[in-house]
Amino acid sequence: MMDTAALKMWATGRIPSARLAHCSRVAQLAQWLAQRYDVDPDKARLAGFLHDCARDESPARLLELAGLWRIPVTEVEARAPILLHAPVGAELVRRECGVEDIQILDAIRFHTTGRSGMSPLEKIVFVADYAEPARDFPGVERVRAAMFECLDTAVRLALDQSLRYLLERGYLVHPNMVAARNALYM
């Protein structure tokens, strides 16, 4: 795996500056949450920093890379390829940066949709991405307040709010998001 300086150079060359600022805020919040919830803060910071490395790829390029790298594409992802930025990003980080830690890769892979059986690190990156300090939308303060008290509550709130947002606008809902939400209520 690349050292920290090399990873920062790689990210700076790949991620536009506004998105890189978001990634830095997510990394800081993920590190703080990891310390709060007894998860490896270095893994949280790295996953948070790299989570959106493929976010600015075009839909066509995301589909192309998914095919090239044999990443399974759900029907929802085929119709909304932006959702592939997470699994494509995980594979990109593995291939180009040498990150082999499955916990870090899964935190990147599922940071957008979540999934049933999320690890604590996956929950941390999911919540940090959702509630990083520059985010400003209805309900984000509830998630921020919850993340200081109970990580699962924060994830549930973020999932519920995301689902409400998607449904109200008639957008497709990724099956992983539904599975993540249901698993947290069982």
Image (cartoon, rainbow, N blue to C red):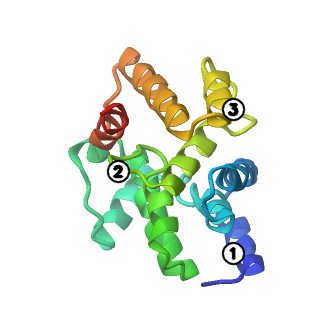
Task: Name which residue lies at 24% across and 49% down.
Answer: 74
Q: Which residue is mark 1?
A: 7
- Residue type, numbered disc 1: Leu
Classify 79 as above or below 124: above
Q: Which residue is mark 3?
A: 135
Say which of 171 and 128 sits in front. Answer: 128
Task: Name which residue lies at 33% across and 73% down.
Answer: 69
Say which of 147 and 172 sits in front. Answer: 147
**Is any part of residue 74 visible from this angle?**
yes
Task: Name which residue lies at 27% across and 40% down.
Answer: 175
Classify 4 as above or below 36: below
- Image quarter of the C terminus: top left
Say which of 88 and 51 sits in front. Answer: 51
CB atoms of marks 1 and 2 within 8 Å = no
User: Closer to the N terminus: mark 1 or mark 3?
Assistant: 1
Question: Is disc 2 surrounded by few (<14), some (14 to 19) or many (20+) residues within 10 Å?
Answer: few
Q: Position of residue 145 (x, y in %)?
A: 68, 27
Numbered mark located on residue 117 in the image: 2
User: Closer to the N terminus: mark 1 or mark 2?
Assistant: 1
Alpha carbon of mark 2 to alpha carbon of mark 3: how far?
A: 26 Å
Report helix, strand or loop for mark 2: loop
* Among the 4 quarters of the image, the one containing residue 150: top right
* Among the 4 quarters of the image, the one containing residue 34: bottom right
Classify 98 as above or below 134: below
Report helix, strand or loop for mark 1: helix
User: Closer to the N terminus: mark 2 or mark 3?
Assistant: 2
Alpha carbon of mark 1 to alpha carbon of mark 2: how far?
A: 29 Å
Say which of 96 and 130 sits in front. Answer: 130
